[in-house]
């Protein structure tokens, strides 16, 4: 400061705007300034303390800085509240309201703290150690007091600065209060709207649940499906079911009325919200979402109430109609009984009584009042049933009317003319002609007085007549017996056709009712992935089985049944047999189905049993049993064919026709035997690889006594005997040990040993024992003794021959398959050595297998050349020796 003053004094007076006077002494200073304007250290009266001024000034600056920061916080809070998006949930809205209320309270507390601080500072400036006024007093009074007090200039400046700061705090507090009033009102309206929406969702869910409960109740269509209008024993059950449904419907109606009252209260609350917000148009919130919800509530109330009333009306109407239809059915039944009891040929009196009974019976129909059933508002399914009943009533009434006409004609009195009767002339007993008649005992007693010659003549004539009658009676009995046999055969064929139609219809129901539902989008999304992925396992090849029966087998049976040339010539049995034999290969479809059945049952038990998807379909189809019971239908059906064929053979007279039917029976029994083997093969456990790689099952041997011998050349060194069950597959023979838990249901086969078909060198009877067969391998020999009585009734000799033939065919098939693979593999290699070996191999094989060669020298020469060639090749490639041994077999 001194430096600045010194510079000013040095400057020229012209350069200064104002006059500058530099006082050298206090006296000169007092000449220009009054003592009241100077501090005590300059000879004045002002009590100026520099350190006190600095402290107050610093406090005022700090107060101003706090007020500035508080203002920024207030602006940030207001901006945040204005720009925030209100949540859509009640909990989130309540949390947001609590959060903003907390922030607002913190700002108010900060404002109160700053006000208290500024008031204290102002009191200190005014030298008041205790505030005489309350903190809540308006700061305008403080400013007036400041002007009234006589303060030093520096104190007055500090007091004004402090008063201005407090005025700013007061304005900020007013702004906060005004904003919070508006913002809190918005939050409360949002919270009320969210409460309304939450209650609406709850009411909507309950309405949907009530709607589902209503849809699950049996309606008129479901009841009509279970109602049989011509059977009175089922009416009681239907009537009880309708009464139970009406009770459930009343309970549902009471719950609906409770929910309707809640929905009405909710709609009124929504209208109150709309009216409250319409009063403040500038702050309206959510009106566009409240009105549609109120309308939806009214619509749900009307729909549910209308559906309940409609279902109650239809069920009561059905209940009334069932009673009425039951009376009509009783009337029709009584009419049929009366028509059957009253014969046509009656006397006049009986005809009159029957006519009276029938007329009285027809008059009973007017008491039933059929016109009540002809209501235009009757639902369509019930109207069709009523039309059927009307048709039946008309039929019975027409029959009764015709019978009445006949009885009226019989009841008319018949005026016959009186005829004159002449007495017969007396005839001699000797002239009685008894030749050609069958005499009775009375006639024989009357004719005892005849002569012996006449008696002998009469006896001879009588015996000849009796013989003729006996032969006629026998022929008539034979004709009657043959007619009965043909009729019974026709009944069996009819049963075959009808049961086949029912079976095809059941398969169609399974495919269309269950399988095709998997592809519907509205049902697909409710199925777990485990069921969707195992759809093919669950149903297996059921569509192929249905296609075979629906398009081929059933059509053939229908053509046979409808062809008069077949039925009239009594060759229907041969046609049926030809149909089974022709479709023999198609029945192999059941092998895959049986092979997959255990996996299908496991999938059903793990994922499908009790699932709502299958339960709803079962209810919609009206099935009493679940799907797994219907999946047993193919296995049950394939076992019924042989029973029907046996019944057909039983009532067939023609021997040639019986032979054809027996051939068809053998075909079906072989198919059942194969299916039985396949079913048992699914119970094999312990096999290290997948059984599907072994091919199909050809034969199964139960309780076979197997002697396994270790051999070196022709010397047997070790023998081991065991009882095993054998399974012959395309590629291998499995030896298993049967494990039965004792309950007869769970039978398993523990895998013990494997014999590869390709390793079998010889398969024949050992030592001409036809009850056994032997398998010769490279180092082992297996002698298999089959049981005497097999499961299919064949003898041990026949079974062993069957095993040998089947094993040889499998060996041949595997050899040809392996040869084709080697040929294909060799063709891919363009090497001269491989081509030369193939040429020699083919030449030797052709030479060995040529049956037309009669020269043994040529054959031995060729064999020796082949052996030398194979020895050389074996050193190069040992695999060729194995193939050659297979070729010899």
Image (tube, helix red, strand yellow):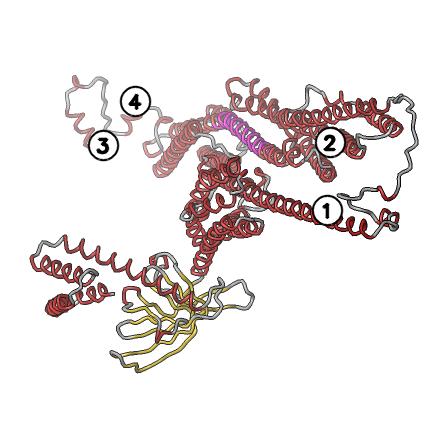
Q: Nearer the viewer, residue 732 or 461?
A: 461
Left or right for 173, reference 713? right
Residue 780 rendering spot, x and y as whole percentages: 30, 75
Left or right for 716, reference 148? left
Dot placed on the residue nearer the N-terminal end, 1 or 2? 2
C-alpha span from label 1 to label 2 = 65 Å
Image quadrant where residue 312 sits: top right
- Can you tell which of label 2 and label 4 is closer to the viewer? 2
Residue 590 rendering spot, x and y as whole percentages: 44, 50
- Crowdedness near tag 2: few (<14), some (14–19) or many (≥20) residues, C-alpha within 10 Å: many
The reply to whether residue 549 is visible in this rendering is yes
Dot placed on the residue nearer the N-terminal end, 4 or 3? 3
Quadrant (top left, top right, bottom left, bottom right) of the C terminus = bottom left
Q: Dot 1 lies on which element?
A: helix
- Can you tell which of label 1 and label 3 is closer to the viewer? 1
Quadrant (top left, top right, bottom left, bottom right) of the N terminus = top left
The residue indicated by pointer 1 is 465
Q: Residue at x 15, y 59 (%)?
A: 842
C-alpha span from label 1 to label 3 = 178 Å
Which range is magenta?
A: 176-204
The residue indicated by pointer 4 is 32
């Amino acid at each position: 400061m001194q430096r600045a003053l010194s510079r000013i004094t040095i400057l020229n007076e012209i350069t200064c705007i104002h006059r500058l006077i530099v006082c050298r002494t206090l006296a000169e200073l007092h000449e220009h300034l009054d003592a009241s304007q100077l501090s005590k250290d300059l000879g004045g009266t002002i009590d100026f303390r520099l350190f006190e001024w600095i402290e107050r000034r610093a406090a005022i600056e700090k107060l101003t800085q706090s007020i500035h920061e508080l203002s920024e916080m207030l602006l940030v809070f207001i901006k945040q509240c204005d720009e925030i998006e209100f949540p859509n949930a009640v909990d989130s809205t309540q949390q947001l309201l609590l959060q903003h209320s907390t922030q607002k309270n913190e700002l108010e507390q900060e404002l109160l703290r700053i006000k208290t601080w500024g008031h204290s500072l102002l009191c200190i400036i005014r030298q008041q150690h205790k505030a005489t006024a309350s903190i809540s007093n308006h700061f305008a009074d403080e400013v007036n007091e400041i002007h009234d007090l006589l303060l030093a200039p520096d104190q007055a400046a500090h007091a004004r600065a402090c008063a201005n700061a407090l005025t700013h705090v007061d304005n900020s507090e007013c702004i906060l209060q005004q904003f919070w009033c508006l913002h809190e009102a918005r939050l409360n309206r949002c919270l009320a709207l969210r409460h309304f929406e939450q209650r609406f969702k709850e009411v909507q869910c309950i309405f949907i649940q009530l709607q589902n409960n209503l849809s699950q109740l049996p309606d008129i269509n479901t009841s009509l499906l279970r109602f049989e209008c011509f059977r009175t024993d089922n009416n009681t059950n239907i009537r009880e079911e309708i009464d139970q449904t009406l009770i459930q419907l009343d309970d549902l109606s009471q719950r609906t009325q409770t929910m309707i009252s809640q929905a009405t209260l909710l709609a009124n609350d929504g209208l109150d919200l709309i009216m409250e917000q319409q009063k403040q148009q500038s702050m309206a919130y959510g009106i566009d979402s409240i009105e549609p919800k109120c309308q939806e509530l009214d619509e749900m109330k009307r729909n549910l109430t209308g559906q309940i009333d409609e279902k109650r009306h239809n069920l009561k109407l059905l209940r009334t109609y069932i009673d009425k239809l039951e009376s009509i059915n009783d009337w029709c039944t009584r009419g049929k009984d009366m028509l059957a009891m009253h014969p046509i040929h009656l006397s006049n009196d009986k005809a009159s009584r029957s006519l009276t009974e029938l007329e009285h019976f027809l008059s009973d129909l007017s008491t039933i009042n059929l016109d009540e059933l002809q209501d235009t508002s009757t639902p369509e399914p019930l109207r069709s049933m009523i039309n059927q009943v009307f048709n039946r009533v008309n039929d019975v009434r027409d029959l009764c009317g015709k019978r009445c006409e006949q009885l009226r004609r019989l009841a008319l009195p018949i005026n016959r003319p009186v005829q004159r009767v002449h007495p017969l002339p007396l005839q001699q007993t000797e002239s009685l002609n008894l030749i050609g008649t069958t005499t009775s005992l009375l006639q024989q007693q009357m004719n005892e007085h005849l002569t012996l010659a006449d008696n002998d003549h009469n006896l001879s004539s009588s015996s000849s007549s009796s013989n003729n009658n006996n032969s006629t009676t026998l022929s008539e009995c034979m004709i009657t017996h043959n007619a009965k046999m043909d009729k019974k055969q026709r009944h069996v064929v009819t049963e075959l056709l009808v049961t086949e139609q029912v079976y095809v219809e059941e398969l169609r129901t399974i495919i269309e009712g269950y399988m095709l539902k998997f592809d519907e989008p509205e049902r697909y999304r409710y199925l777990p992935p485990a069921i969707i992925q195992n759809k093919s396992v669950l149903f297996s090849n059921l569509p192929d089985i249905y296609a075979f029966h629906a398009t081929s087998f059933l059509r053939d049976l229908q053509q046979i049944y409808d062809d008069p040339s077949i039925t009239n010539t009594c060759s229907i049995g041969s046609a049926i047999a030809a149909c089974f034999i022709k479709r023999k290969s198609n029945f192999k479809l059941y092998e895959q189905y049986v092979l997959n059945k255990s996996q299908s049952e496991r999938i059903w038990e793990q994922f499908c049993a009790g699932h709502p998807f299958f339960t709803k379909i079962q209810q919609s189809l009206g099935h009493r049993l679940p799907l797994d019971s219907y999946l047993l239908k193919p296995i049950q059906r394939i076992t019924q064919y042989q029973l029907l064929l046996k019944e057909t053979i039983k009532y067939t007279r023609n021997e040639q026709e019986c032979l054809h039917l027996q051939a068809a029976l053998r075909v079906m029994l072989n198919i059942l035997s194969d299916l039985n083997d396949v079913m048992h093969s699914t119970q094999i456990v312990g096999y290290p690889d997948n059984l599907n790689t072994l091919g199909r099952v050809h034969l199964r041997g139960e309780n076979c006594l197997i002697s396994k011998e270790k051999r070196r050349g022709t010397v047997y060194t070790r023998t081991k005997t065991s009882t095993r069950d054998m399974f012959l597959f395309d590629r291998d023979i499995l030896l298993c040990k049967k494990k039965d838990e004792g309950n007869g249901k769970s039978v398993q086969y523990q895998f013990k040993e494997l014999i590869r078909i390709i390793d079998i060198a010889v398969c024949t009877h050992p030592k001409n024992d036809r009850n056994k067969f032997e398998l010769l391998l490279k180092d082992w020999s297996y002698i298999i003794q089959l049981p005497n009585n097999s499961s299919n009734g064949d003898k041990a000799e026949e079974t062993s021959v069957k095993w040998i033939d089947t094993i040889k065919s499998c060996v041949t098939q595997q050899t040809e398959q392996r040869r084709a693979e080697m040929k294909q593999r060799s063709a891919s290699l363009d090497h001269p050595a491989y081509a030369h070996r193939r040429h020699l191999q083919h030449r030797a094989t052709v030479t060995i297998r040529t049956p037309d060669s009669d020269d043994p020298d040529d054959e031995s020469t060729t064999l020796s050349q082949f052996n030398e060639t194979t020895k050389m090749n074996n050193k190069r490639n040992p695999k060729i020796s194995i193939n050659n041994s297979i070729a010899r077999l």
